[in-house]
Amino acid sequence: MKLLEQISSIAGKYFAFWVMAIAVIAFMLPDLFVGLGAYITILLGVVMFGMGLTLKAVDFKIIFKNPLPVIVGVVAQYVIMPLCAFAIAYALNLPAELAAGLVLLGSVPGGTASNVMVYLARGNLPLSVSMTSFSTLLAPITTPFILLLLAGQWLPVDAGAMVLSIVQVIIIPIVLGLTIRRFFTRAVDKSITVVPLISVLAIIIIVSAVVAGNVENIASAGLLIFTAVALHNAFGLLLGYFTAVAMKLDESTRRAISLEVGMQNSGLGVALASAHFGPLAALPSAAAAVWHNISGPILATLWAKRPAKTQDPSAAQSEKEERRRKQA
């Protein structure tokens, strides 16, 4: 078990490197990976099941105890990111599938990688976890609605089918994970450190499948895709931060909201795009899986060198408890 824990730690620490490496290999040797596309939905379900295993009741407590930062962050995420994606798609004159795929990326909830970035950035970790959880639970309603509103002009959007997909690949696995943690707490606590390894492997396989199935598209439009994704991410980080500034929230909360708004659940974006729009539409989310894990650590490292102002006492205490739990 200790060996697996060490491997899991290495996998999580160098996640961006592994994703970039597998993307290059899949681009050069697509025949080895193209068949994995059939397992994207299952793999994302595995990632969400792992998320459910890590969630606890305390992660939702902040929503009721101090709801303003959570509401501000989640609203900012579901307003800023879709509108930025829509504007960038128009400004860069993206082809229909890529435009819809970028809007889809902007319409999915936050990813769990943002929690790690907030921790490294000395941000408000309990808020980050609560935002990820809350935005994920809202996804069956918000994501199809936003896509119907903004992406329908490029490609037809079957909102009902998308709701069903999100429930199947997110809500059911998370609820299953929460249930298993509730009834088998001790066993889950003993094995929880291996969950990041499983999640990393699942995301790596998803990225490899998308790249292998889009070699020609990447060769012709790879730079355009990465430019769109990088701009989208930058606007999200920047506008998320200044939204928190406008609401007069403290520095640690600003950092949490910035990273939560700027970093999406790219695995969900890939799965939904592949199922409902086509393989080309999955490329923005696949590119985001790489880029977010480059920009996030860079920003977190810069912030880590500058102590944040202390947040409210309850959040500070929760963060201390979370850090002790991670170190235990």
Image (cartoon, rainbow, N blue to C red):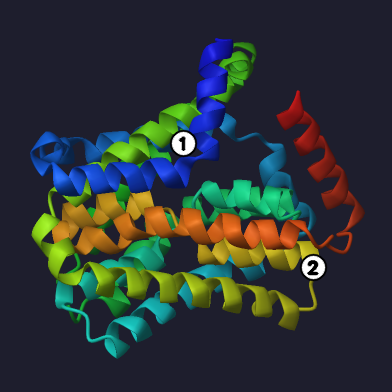
Which residue is drawn at the image coordinates 29% and 41% (left, top)? 22
Q: Gap between marks 2 and 1, in whole Å? A: 31 Å
Q: Position of residue 9 (x, y in %)?
A: 56, 29
Res 174 label? 1
> Helix or strand or loop: what does disc 2 sit on?
helix
Q: Residue at x 17, y 57 (%)?
A: 276
Q: Is residue 246 visible?
A: yes
Residue 323 figure quarter: top right
Amino acid under label 2?
Answer: Glu
- Which residue is at the front of the view, 251 or 70? 251
The N terminus - image quarter: top right
As helix, strand or loop, the secondary structure at mark 1 comes to helix
Extreme residue toward the bottom, this view? 91
Specify few, some or many for label 2: CA neighbours under 10 Å numbering under 14, 14-19, or 20 or more. many
Does residue 146 appear in this view?
Answer: no
Picture coordinates of residue 46 (x, y %)? 37, 32
Left or right, 40 with respect to 140, comes to left
Give the residue at x 56% y 21%.
Answer: 6
Three-letter code, disc 1: Ile
Number of the label disc, if any, that sits on residue 251: 2
Position of residue 20 relative to residue 160, above or below, is above
What x and y, as percent, mark residue 251?
79, 68
- Looking at the figure, which quarter contains the C terminus? top right
Q: Which of 207 and 182 is in front in this view?
A: 207
Left/right placement of residue 208 relative to residue 62 reads left
